[in-house]
Every structure is written in C-alpha cells, then in structure tokens.
Amino acid sequence: MPPRGPRVQGRVVALTGAASFLGRNLVGVLEEDASVAGIVALDVQAPPTAGKKTRFYEIDLTRPSAEVRIAEVLRAEDVDTFLHLAFLSSPSHAPAYSHELESVGTMRVVTACRSARVRKLVQASTTLLYGARPTNPNFLSERHPLRARRDDPFFADKIEAEQEALRLGQRGSGTLVTVLRTAPILGPTVHNTLTKYLGRKLVPTMMGFDPLVQFLHEVDAIAAFKRAIDRDAPGIFNIVADGVLPLSTVIKLAGRAGVPVPHPLARPALEALWVAHVAEAPSSFIDYLRFLCVADGRKAQRELGFTATYTTREALVDFASVQLLRDVRLIHDRDKATPDKDTVGATGAKAVTSA
Amino acid sequence: MSKKKPKKAEPKRARATSEVKTKPSEPPHVIAEPSTVEPSVDFSANFAPASAVDAAESVEVAESAPPESGPKSTKESNADDDSAADYGADLVAEISAYVPDVASDDVLDAPAHAEGHAPRGLGGDVGGELRAVEAEVDRILHEHVRLDEPPGVAEGLGLGAAFRVVERLREAIPVELPGEQGGTLVDAAKDVLSTDYYLRQWGRLGLRNRSEEVDEFGLDPVYEARFRPFFDLLYKYWFRVEVEGLENVPDDGRCILVGNHSGVLPYDGIMVRTAVRRAHPAAREVRWLAEDFVYHLPFLGAFMNRIGAVRACQENAERLLEGERCVLVFPEGIKGIGKLWRDRYQLQRFGRGGFVKLALRTGAPIIPVAIVGAEESAPMLYKVEYLTEALGLPFVPVTPGFPIFGPLGFIPAPTKWRIKFLPAVDLEGSGPESADDALLVNRLAERVRGTIQESLDKTVATRKSVFF
C-alpha cells in the first residue's frame, strides 16, 4: 500500500515516554507548534508540560495487551507521527523489567503502528550502542555495526529495540522509520548516567586512558526530534554536537577531580559497587572510559538538516555551571528534593537562602 | 588583619596623588615642548596618564605655546577632551595607588619616550604610533600591577620574599593562593580548610599544559607545543636529520606520504612531521597514522593521540584527506617495526594496498618517503612472541639496550637520518571507480614499494657511516 502523504496542518503526534526528559520537553514544544493539531501522550504518568492539545492515556508498555490499547488509541486519534521515547536513560537493576519495557515494548509499539497504519515512527536511540572499542574509527558512521556489549541488558535491549523498529521500515508497511542515535545528552536540566558520573566530586577514570568524548546539549536533542517530526527523513541518524574533548579535559572543565583507577581492578570493583547499589553504572560502562565512541553527525546535517547549536565543550560548560549551583545546594532538583513549601514560595530569594 | 589592608593602601594612594600634583610643576614634557602640528597636541590630550593629570594647565600651556601650533584646533581638541581628561586623572590616581614607585615612574616616563616618536609620525601614521605607545604603557602597567597585586595576606604575615618566590613559580604552575579571591586571612583560612579549594587547584594543575580544546582527531596544540623543543632537539642534534626533496610535497591540499616503517620505537612518524613543519616552506602539518596496538596501551595511546597520531584505518584516513590534510602512512605496519636486524631496509609487504585505494578514492597524490637511519637507531636482534598476549603488544623486542638496561635501552642510538621525499607516483590517471580493481591497486602499491626500495638502496649504499 502506498504511504500516506504528509499532512502539513492538523497533524496528530503520539508519543510514548511522555513524562521522560525528552518526552515532556517535546510535549511542550509541540504544544506551541501551530501545525500540530493534537498530542497523544502515552505513559504511566502524565507529562507536566501537557496543555490544551495534549490528551493523556495511561498505557504501560510492559503490560501484555499494550499493543491492542495503543492501536485503538492511534486509530481513534488518527495519529500521523509516532514518537517512541520510552527508554531507560540509566542502567536498571531490574533487567527483566528493562527488557520488557525496551525490547518487548518496542515490539508492541511497532505492532500497533503497523496495524494503525501510522505514517511515521521516530525512535530514540543512542550512540553508546556503537560500543567503545579500540578498533573504532575516530568518527563512527551510521553504517558501522553496533558493537556495544551484548552481555549488558542496557545495551542489548536497546539494540534489539532499534532492529525491531528498522524492520518495520524495511517491510514496506508504508511507515517511515527514523532512528535518532543521540550522543550522551548533557545540559542544565537533564538527569542520566552521565550527569550522575560528572556530578561526583571525585570522578573515577581509567589510569593511562584518556579517550575523546562527545556530548549533545539537551536543547539540541529536543531540536533534533522536532526536526525529525517535521521532516520526512527515513533512516538512522547520528545526532551529535561538533567537537570532541579528551575525558580528562571534560572532568577538569566540569570542576571535578579525576581519580585514575587501574582498569583490571576497576571492573570487579565497579561490578561489586553496582550490585551494592552504590555505583551508577555496571562494569560494562568502563569501556567508554577507555576507548573511543564518537559518532559522525554529517548525515543528519545533510539529510535531516540538523546542526547542533552547542558544541561538545559548550554543552559541558552549560552543564557545569548549573552543576556548580547544585553542588552548593542553590538548586534543588524537583524529582530529588523533598516537597518543601518554602522552596516553592512566592519569594525566590527566600527559596535560595533557605536552600 | 582584614582591617590592615585598607590602611596599608591609604598612604600609597596619598603618595600617588601628591606625586600627581607635583608633576605639573616639573616641565610637563608632553605639552611644554613646542608641538608643531595638531596631531601631536591631540595626541598629548588624548594620551592617558601623565598628560591627562591637569587638563586645565595643559590647555594653558598649549595656548601659550608658539603660534605655529595652530591654536584654534588645539583649543577644540582640548575642549573635547576635558571630560576625558578628568576621567583620565581619576584613572591615574587609581592606577598609581596600586602601582609602586618604580611603576609610576615608568608610567610617567613613558610619554616622554612616546613624544620622541611623535614628530616622526607627522607623515600620517599617528594613530598607529599612538596604539603602539598605548600598548607599551599597557604592558608596563600590566607588569607592575600584576607584581604588586598581593592579596594582603602574604604581606600581612611578612612573607614578602616568600610571596615573590611563589609569584615566580606561578608563571609555571598556575596555583591560586589561599584567600586570593577573598583577600582576607579569614577567607584564606576558609580556603585552606575546604576540599573545594584543593579540588580546584588539582583541576588547574591538570590543565596547565593542556589546551581546553583539541582538534577533531585529538591533537592538543598546547600539549604538543610543549613537546616540540624535545622533538626539535632529536631532529636537529640527535638524529641530525637531512631532508631532501621537500618540493615534492605540495604546499596545500590533500596528499598521502608513504614511508618505510622502521626502528623498534618508531620515531619516524614524529620525525617526518617535524621535518615537514621545520623545513617545508608552507610548514605543513603532517598527521601520521599509528598502528592499532598503540591504542590498546595505557598512557602511550593517549599520548600519541595528543601529539598528532591518528589510529590507522580507512575511515580516519579518508576524513583527514577530506579535510585537505597531509597524511603519513606506513603500509608495512607492525611488520615494518617488527623487522629483525638482518632484514633492515628490506621493505615488507605493503598491507593490502589500502593506501592506493585511499588515493584513488580521494584523488590525493601519493608521495613516497624513504627514511634511512631509523633502522639503526633501535635495531631489533630478536623478538619474543610468547609474552605478547598478556602484554597486548605485537612482540617483545630484544635490542642491544633492551631489556639489559631496562627502559634506558629504548633511548634511540644517535644515528644520522636521511629523509627523502620522492616525486609523486603516477596513478595512471585512474579515478575513484578503479579503487575496486585489485590488479591495478596491487600494481600501483608495488610501484610505490619499488620506488621507496630503490631510493633506500641507493642512500644506504652511498652513505659513508651510520652515524655521520
């Protein structure tokens, strides 16, 4: 069947993971976009940015019958573009749950999209899936195989999810599939493994290794998804910022002190700390402190028309300036801080001084 | 202690202002000299510290000056500058409050020096002259102000001498002294007691030899610049590198240098880079491609990357060439540096001709480079291959110095190096479409290999000694 033509006006955009960082920001952006007629938010929790256009459906992707529900909603709302953002931004201690959410959840989304004949599916992914290997070229293109450690469910589930979505695009179902592999996202408001890592005062590094790293500013990440919604560009795209920095420089610019650890010791130590819920990531992340995992964003520039406005360094500096305020407790993060009437009071000054 | 600082500052300020006041009684050298043409008057009125001290007086002086200084224009310019002069006076008072005696003398002498130049500038470049003088004064001011910017704490403790020593050291080591930001002893004590202070210093120390940005392949310009003297030393005095045929390397645009790889510790990459930087008229930057195993090794991998090596792979080479850079490849790879002494100057197999495909695809010329002398700088007598798995090395070398003398054995012998850049190889007009033609690729690779081998044989045969 021929693909449906794009509707310029009156599009309806559905998104999973609507309450996630990308989700709630994109809901806010789409609310203000006049060409979007409606937003269908699918999540277990309503996005705080929801406005008049947004309709929220409580759908849990880990439930067995989720695809039927989603398909019903998609048909009822006449959804044009589907954004699949329900992925974990940090590794989970419950691998069964994350597998159900990411790998199986994507399968359910894909099934629903096919049965509801959604015109376009945009899915989030990450450049971490390329894997940090000493044999990586300095810039990984989209054609490069995904070589992240499959023994870690964090990567394995995401790779499976990506393949699931791409299969939908290949099968001639009439759905355009765009996968955006974003570099690790950094910025003043986002929370993920990376911000936790750089949020420490003493940041562990691997002794003798100083890989080049690359980030993406949160604003650019949101802009890239908006681009992908607005423009039909099927395929895989690396969404990255310009420039690279050595990890040691990153730590210093963030105002942290690096603690070099010999890598043979680091692996068992980190595994133990991960099991004890002290570390923020399992030992499979050590590779990223040793070897290159930097992607080439020229395809996105060419075909998607996306150019990052922040360089890697600017993204880092932006994060670091806010992190400094967090360090001295001038900023409380809403999701972390206990509800406190003083801090949400009318006087901003009071909130600051009491903090 | 915190109260002491303003007190100490007070007498200085008073002294400074008194100096300022006494100045006009001396011959104000800027103005009193019969200024012949208006630009120089303009100059004096505009000019910062000394002349601006008493604008009113300077106007009088200027008016009483000989008639050849067009009085009309002088008046105008001075009237315009009245407010500026007031501001200048304040500025002077403020600056001289911070500047010690020597400094203020210097500053006040500067215009005299400048005046000496002014008449010569009549021709027209007064603006340029002014800027030069301003820059000089800025420099003098900057020098003294910086030296005389004690946070008060060190002074208060009577640590003048120690403070000066620290001041010298800080040129090299950018450590912030306790209390430098706050300035009082209490702040200093707070600093000393806080972990943040130490973390900050640690971070600064770590970045002292680093640039905050690297290029897309990881070259750190500041870090590399620090090692340049060492490489220059090796180049000039240790290996006494003799370079020939640099005219074969184009001044700009992409090109591939293909060299013979030799010596257990391959200094050839960095030496070719140094040679092209120092001897080539365009001082081109060469990026050389290093073997994979280097990047598995701790310390060495990161170091090589910061000084300009790039991991050898097709994607990297292509991207470098697309950036119109000059890329040095060693197609022999590990086989080249893993040669035994008896095989010296015998070129090994040239990989799979990857560099030819690269040249065909990117349209870059191939320039063969014959390097003589590197083989003898670290000859390998024997290689141990059973430790390789555990160490992550392709082989463990046995050289005349290693492992008997430990790491010292890796110091290269001071052989005489001869680097010869040969004319670009004829690619028979083939384009990107023939990159998949295995026969052609092999033929071209063989041709490059033959060219280098021929040149090596000739040089080795004609040289009189390995060391001279």
Image (tube, coloured by chain):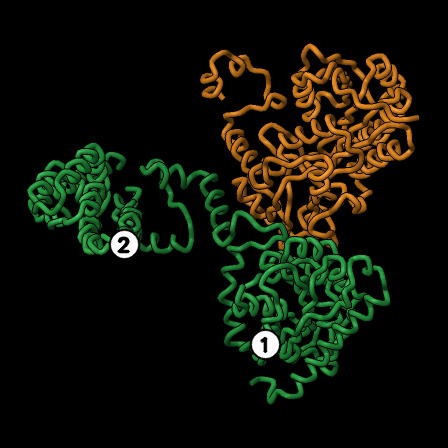
Chain colours: A orange, B green
Q: Position of residue B144 (x, y in %)?
A: 27, 50
Quarter the N terminus of chain A occupies = top right
Residue A354 vs B99, above or below: the answer is above
Labels 1 and 2 in the same subunit: yes
Q: CA distance from mark 1 to mark 2?
A: 54 Å
Name the side, left or right, on which A245 lies relative to A54: left
Residue A14 vs A140, above or below: the answer is above
Q: Which mark is residue A211?
A: none
Residue at 50% in and 71% down: B233
Question: Which of pointers 1 and 2 lies earlier in the amino acid sequence?
Answer: 2
Q: Residues within 10 Å of mark 1 (few under 14, many from 20)?
A: some
Are dots 1 and 2 in contact, CB under 8 Å? Answer: no
Q: Position of residue B265 (x, y in %)?
A: 65, 70
Residue B168 vs A281, above or below: the answer is below
Name the subunit of mark 1: B
Q: Quadrant of residue B92?
A: top left
Q: Nearer the viewer, residue A28 or B328?
A: B328
Q: Residues within 10 Å of mark 2 (few under 14, many from 20)?
A: few
Name the subunit of mark 2: B
User: Which residue position holds label 2?
Assistant: B161
Please name the amino acid that badge 2 sits on: Ala
Name the side, left or right, on which A144 lies relative to B458: right
Can residue A265 be spotted in the picture? no
Residue A49 vs B185, above or below: the answer is above
Of helix, strand and loop, which one carries label 2?
Answer: helix
Please name the amino acid that badge 1 sits on: Glu
Residue at 65% in and 83% down: B459
Of helix, strand and loop, which one carries label 1?
Answer: strand
Q: Which mark is residue B244?
A: 1
Q: Nearer the viewer, residue B447 or A26?
A: B447
Residue at 34% in and 36% down: B186
